[in-house]
Structure formats: structure tokens, C-alpha cells
Image (cartoon, helix red, strand yellow):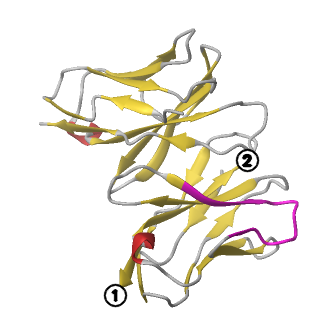
């Protein structure tokens, strides 16, 4: 079974640009979550999608947005990039969202560098 | 809001020895789950072990076990017979009714040959 796939793995942008990151969950998983990992702030929750609906959102500005498609694939977008947005963005999928016992399966992440 | 604290930024252990990583958390919820995740240099986060708060019995997965003290809000990870492949960043995480994972700051584990 293929794992969580994130693309691109690495990207470099300049301040003010926007970026879109993609995540394909494990087949059959309908819940997708996004996390930002930085040396200073650690791992922080961005948002969670289930059945194309945002179910939960972390404490990030409106420049951070996401969506989920009918095939459960998800994208996140960051507009008007700032230097502080440089981070590893991790996507995680799980088979359900009705219970919070379930394991999250993580992808390898997308490393964003903002110059 | 829930918080998770890992007070050991770095730990080292000799191969084949035992090491314990500490984690404390703060919550007002009674029903929640605790996790230890491992992030090797390849960056992919992997679940090591999971503990349900309502279970008094400590979880065990092969060489990995936890010491869960609910009243003290403590959740430590013990790695027995440490192997070189155990070297990684270890994150303690909490998941409650809000469903997202709240992570600690991590402990970098080095295994010495």
C-alpha cells in the first residue's frame, strides 16, 4: 500500500509569492491534516479536512488555506509568502475522523524556503 | 489549551542499553490519547506507541514501552536494548476532543556504538 505522498519535496520561493503544496493520502483514508514544522515553533497544526470539508483549523493567518478534493487528495496554499513561512510542511492522513484514537500516517514533507 | 512538554532536548544511550525519554502534558480533559512519534533524518514521522488515557495498563510495543501516570500527567517512553536505528528525534503528542495532535518540542536521541 502506497504511503502518504507529498509534492513537491523541496521548493524555493521569494517573499510575496504564493505556493501550493499537494498531498495524496493513503488509499481509503478520508481525513487529511497539515502541520508546519520549524526549528523555533516546532510542530504546529494547520488544518484538517474530511470529506472535502475543513473540520478544524489551527492558529494561522488567513494567508494559509487548504482544500480537499473528492478523491481525498489535499492541497494547501500560502499566499504573500513571508520569510517566517520557511518550514517543513507535513501532511498526515487517517482512515476516519469520528474518533481521535486513530493513528496519523505522515508523509515525508515539503521543504519550503522563502528568500 | 493543551500543552506538551519534553524537557530533554537531547539524550544519548549506548547501544544495547536502556533509555527513558520524559514527557509531561497539561489538559482538563479526561478522555484523550497520547503518542510517541519518531522522526529519523529522512523526516518521515512514524508512530512508535500509543496510550489511551482510560487504560491503566501501560502500552508496550516490542522494545518500546511507556510509563503512563495519569494523575501526574506524565508519559515517558522507555527504549530497551537500544539499536543504532533508534537514533532519531522523538516527539510526544497529545490528541483530545479537538482531534489535532499537539506535539512536544522533541528529544534528539543519539545511539552510541
Residue at image location 47% in from the left, 34% down from the top: A4
Mark 1 sits on what residue?
B113
- The quarter of the rendered structure image containing the C terminus of chain A is top left
Badge number at residue B96: 2
**In contact (CB < 8 Å): disc 1 and disc 2:** no
Chain at numbered mark 1: B
Give the answer, above or below, for where B6 lies relative to A78: below
The image quarter containing residue A42 is bottom left
* Residue at position x 78%, y 31% in the image: A98
Q: Position of residue B34 (x, y in %)?
A: 69, 59
> Whole-percent x and y of residue B90?
48, 66
Q: Position of residue A57 (x, y in %)?
A: 56, 30
Q: Is residue B49 above or below residue A102?
A: below
A75 vs A78, left or right, is right
Q: Magenta span covers which residues?
A: B47-61
- Does residue B82 lie above or below B36 as drawn? below
B55 magenta-colored: yes
Residue A64 lies in quadrant: top left
Residue drawn at x 51%, y 90% as measured from the top left: B17
Amino acid at each position: 500500500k502506497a504511503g502518504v505522498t507529498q509534492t513537491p519535496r523541496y521548493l524555493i520561493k521569494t517573499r510575496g509569492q504564493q505556493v501550493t503544496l499537494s498531498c495524496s493520502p493513503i488509499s481509503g483514508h478520508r481525513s487529511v491534516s497539515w502541520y508546519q514544522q520549524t526549528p523555533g515553533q516546532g510542530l504546529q497544526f494547520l488544518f484538517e479536512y474530511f470529506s472535502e470539508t475543513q473540520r478544524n483549523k489551527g492558529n494561522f493567518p488567513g494567508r494559509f488555506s487548504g482544500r480537499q478534493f473528492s478523491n481525498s487528495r489535499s492541497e494547501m496554499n500560502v499566499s504573500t509568502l513571508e520569510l517566517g513561512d520557511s518550514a517543513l510542511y507535513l501532511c498526515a492522513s487517517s482512515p476516519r475522523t469520528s474518533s481521535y484514537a486513530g493513528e496519523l500516517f505522515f508523509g515525508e514533507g515539503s521543504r519550503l524556503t522563502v528568500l | 489549551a493543551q500543552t506538551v512538554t519534553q524537557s530533554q532536548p537531547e539524550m544519548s544511550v549506548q547501544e544495547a542499553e536502556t533509555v527513558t525519554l520524559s514527557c509531561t502534558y497539561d489538559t482538563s480533559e479526561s478522555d484523550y490519547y497520547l503518542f510517541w512519534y519518531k522522526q529519523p533524518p529522512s523526516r518521515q514521522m512514524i508512530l512508535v506507541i500509543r496510550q489511551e488515557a482510560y487504560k491503566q495498563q501501560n502500552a508496550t510495543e516490542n522494545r518500546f514501552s511507556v510509563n503512563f501516570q495519569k494523575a501526574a500527567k506524565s508519559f515517558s517512553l522507555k527504549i530497551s536494548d537500544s539499536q543504532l536505528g533508534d537514533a532519531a528525534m522523538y516527539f510526544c503528542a497529545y490528541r483530545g476532543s479537538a482531534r489535532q495532535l499537539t506535539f512536544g518540542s522533541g528529544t534528539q536521541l543519539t545511539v552510541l556504538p
